[in-house]
Image: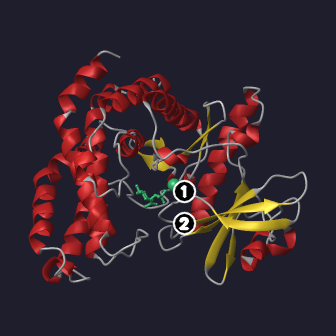
Amino acid sequence: MEDLARIAGQFEIEGRVEEVRPLGNGLINDTYKVVTSGEGPDYVLQRINNAVFKDVDLLQDNIVAVTRHIRRKLEAAGEADIDRKVLRFIPLKKESGGAKTYLCEDGRYWRVSVFIDRARTFETVDPVYSEYAGEAFGHFEAMLADIPDTLGETIPDFHNMELRLRQLVEAVRADKAGRLHQDENTPGRELHSILSEIDRYGVQMCRAERLHREGKLPKRICHCDTKVNNMMFDEDGSVLCVIDLDTVMPSYVFSDFGDFLRTAANPVAEDSPELDKVDFDMDIFKAFSRGYIRGTRLFLTPVERENLPYAACLFPFMQAVRFFADYLNGDTYYKISYPEHNLVRTRNQMKLFASAMEKVPLMQDFLCTL
Ligand code: GN1
Ligand code: MG
């Protein structure tokens, strides 16, 4: 922890570092809370995973542009308590590099932002919170609709289903961890049946890319990681802000709609082995949709709106493909806690996908009532 305190100390933080402790449970970056002495705020220190985010310069430029734009809007609207409503990244001290908001040391990348006090995140939400979250994520997209900066893709083609399928095909071909053909604990038969299920729906799930090529579906600035736990709520339950901005980039609105429901409409965690409990919860869908449609009413096109049920299916499917490819590659991308973790996650997401697919007609009927 001493080294972490020293790293935090290279940024323009107020007060003296008293303690650094792990924070949150992201699968990509390492996150810590930096507790400081005195009146100033506490901070969040993050090691940016530069194996995943290869262009940290572009990543931080995106984040600075996004937070600056939102901050200006909040100021113009006369909002109070702005440091709790948008993230603030701290520049390096002059002697450590000045203006930049990240530090590169021994090939490791670090950044610091203000810790939002008295805020809460949730791993699960009820319909009331889902509606708030729907409106807040919609509002986030709406605020960024007129950002003057051009944002780059921090992970190129991040939510491109065609690419994700190609990556799976490549993982199957290489079978790097020898799991497809040799795994004794997991009968290869199950792995092949997952593959054939994916194959069955692959073309259908690539609809977004086709619509985009046909000029019918725009890319907008989206959050692209709208997991339930990436939204901060105040003590009274109101939404404070959206966090985890690494993947904010041009994408289809399906990303934000689908990824939230992937985590919120599943009554159990994405890595739960209790498959009989995995189910796509329509009450959460209805509440989230109500909020989201309200938050995006100024820009959502009929094609985007019609395809929201597809988005609800696409994201569990895409996540299953990603987890499964990582499993076959020998777990090089997502953090795992035990050897079968990515396979357990794959099974869970395939079950959620099947449940969402069954409910598409119900989703369509509901959206017609809004
Ligand atoms: C990753 O780091 P975290 O948990 O916020 C991933 C998301 C996945 C998610 C699955 C950059 O997000 O795309 O949906 O895990 N982020 C990246 O839990 O790949
Ligand atoms: Mg996160």
Q: Amino acid at mark 1?
A: Asp
Judge the density around disc 1: few (<14), some (14-19), many (≥20) Cα neighbours within 10 Å.
Answer: many
Above or below, 330 against 150 in this view is below
Q: Horizontal placement of 101 versus 357: left or right?
A: right
The residue shown at (14%, 50%) is 201
Q: Is residue 53 left or right of residue 216?
A: right
The C terminus lies in quadrant: top left
Q: Position of residue 95 (x, y in %)?
A: 86, 74
In this rendering, would 123 be left or right of 24? left
Quadrant position of residue 4: bottom right
Badge count? 2
Q: Nearer the viewer, residue 205 or 241?
A: 241
Q: Is residue 336 visible to us here?
A: yes
Q: CA distance from mark 1 to mark 2?
A: 10 Å
Q: Earlier in the sequence, mark 1 or mark 2?
A: 2
Q: Secondary structure at mark 2?
A: loop
- Which of the 4 image quadrants contains residue 345? bottom left
Give above or below for 278 relative to 24.
above
Q: Position of residue 148 (x, y in %)?
A: 61, 42
Quadrant the N terminus occupies: bottom right
- Which residue position holds label 2? 29
Q: Position of residue 33 (x, y in %)?
A: 69, 61
Query: Which of these two is toward me, 157 or 333?
Result: 333
- Secondary structure beneath disc 1? helix
Tell me if the residue at label 2 has its CB under 8 Å from ligand 1. yes
Specify the amino acid type for callout 2. Asn
- Report if the CB atoms under discs 1 and 2 are less than 8 Å apart: yes
Mark 1 residue's CB less than 8 Å from ligand 1:
yes
Q: Which mark is residue 246?
A: 1
Give the residue at the far top of this rendering. 369
Q: Nearer the viewer, residue 280 or 302?
A: 280
Q: Residue at x 66, y 39 (%)?
A: 70
